[in-house]
Amino acid sequence: MPYEGEFAGYRSIRRIADTERVQKLLNRSKVANAQQKQSVLEAEPAPDAVTDLPAFVLAIDGSYQEVDVKTGYPGAKVGYVTVASVLLDLAGVSELDEARPVDPKEFRKTEQASTIDSALPGSNVITINQSGAQESFRQELYEVFHDVILDDDQRIRLLSTFEALLAYKPKSKTQSCPYSESDGCDESFAIPNGCTQCPSCKKPIFSTDALRIHERFRDVGTNGEAFGLVMQVWERVLLIHILRCFEQQGILDHVGRLAFFLDGPLAQFGPPAWLSAAISSELKRLNKIVHDKTGSDLLILGIEKTGNFVTHFDEIDQTENPGEARFPNRSYLLLTDSYIKERIAYSESDKRYGEDTYFGRKFFYKSQSGARIVASMPFLNDDQDTLDSDDIGLYPQFPTICALLDKLVSSRYENAVSPLIAAHSHAAIPLHLGAKVLKRLAQALMGDR
Ligand SMILES: [Zn+2]
């Protein structure tokens, strides 16, 4: 029973867990059993990096906060959603870091402006031209996509990247009119680019309605779920946007100087999950250009701080002797479909784990300093797009990834992107909102900083 330590003090939970009804349910439930035949994967020693480490790491890390505001209507709330991107100069990362820890909170203070910075309507916040909070939310979401521009020259909108991803969504997949609940419109259609109107009720439709985040928007109460989805979408679309801007500028062949770190798994959950397949297709297309030009793959990593995979790694690293770990430092485990379904997310389905949500593959890594890292790397071609093979050679960037994690992750701040950056804050260059972001990145890529 996990309740003992975890919920110490919450006696009522303990009481509920002991009730006859709960016990009856558990008796009818499958319980992971050590005696049962279970997949066991052995930790493998990390391969040595054969190429140089990238010169820079670009970390993309969002956050959101819901705040109460005064509008004269009760319970009015606004969601403040930001996505920070920080460029880390690896040459500036010294061995002395652990001796000079930086408080992540203090570092955040110095980093106020973000690459995407927005306030979105929550419950009971209605913008001037709209008739309801949900409609206001939809319009503001569209406008942020429309307004975010990171480059001075071509002025490519974040919206154009989103609509490029939308083009991958099968047109046969229609969705109900966003006004189905408020106005009873029963039209169902594929959302086009730009700002259009519903063929039936003639009300405004935004291309970003295809994200369907508004379906999780609530007119009353808290909208943490909707804002969390917005944040997750922005982080992922921003990654693709930066790569597409490099493509437009003709500098994709220099992208080997840059590694991308994303907060969270390489996946998209909830109503916008269709983005996952679109991102995967777009990453494969971009990677082919990079690979044809340079012979190397893109270097992209998603790092998970919490969740079942993090818990599982912690558990399997324990041995009977307290303080002794099962995973040696510099070892890894490439997770397979059968392992995940038997040991972490129980399923008897033939459908691949995360088929509709993931665009990358998970692995566990124990760094040189002993930090446990749960991360995923993207499927960059069709061969890599598997959870069955345990051949690490499918992912030629893996040795470099291990070396990079060894360099960046201290045992003090395991499993996290922003603390990781904070730990090296003297080498970090925050990329603020505005058109200069891409310029700085391009300069870094071209090596003339
Ligand atoms: Zn309609």
Image: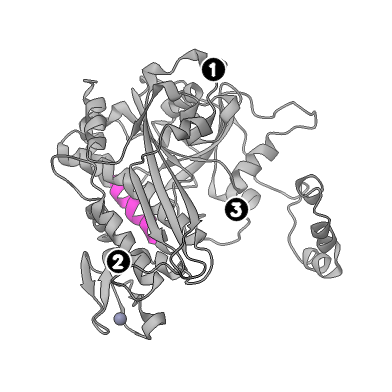
Amino acid on which the number 1 mark rests in the picture: Arg
Amino acid on which the number 3 mark rests in the picture: Lys
Check the image and report above or below for 180 versus 315. Answer: below
Q: Is residue 2 left or right of residue 358?
A: right
**x 63%, y 24%: residue:** 328
Q: Is residue 55 left or right of residue 245?
A: right
How busy is the neighbourhood of tag 2: few (under 14 within 10 Å), some, or many (20 plus)?
few
Dot 3: what SS? Answer: helix
Camera sees residue 384: no
Query: Which picture quadrant has residue 130?
Result: bottom left
Marks 1 and 2, Cα distance to the nearest angstrom? 51 Å
- Segment tinted magenta in the rendering: 274-284
Q: Is residue 154 left or right of residue 93?
A: left
Which comes before the other along the chain, label 1 or label 2?
A: 1
The residue identified by callout 1 is 100
The residue identified by callout 3 is 341
Residue 156: % across, % down: 19, 47
Query: So how many labels did they put on this image?
Result: 3
Which comes before the other along the chain, label 3 or label 1?
A: 1
Check the image and report above or below for 37 versus 404. Answer: below
In front: mark 3 or mark 1? Answer: 1
Residue 158: % across, % down: 26, 51
How busy is the neighbourhood of tag 3: few (under 14 within 10 Å), some, or many (20 plus)?
some
Residue 413: % across, % down: 57, 30
Give the dominant element type of the magenta stretch: helix, strand or loop.
Answer: helix
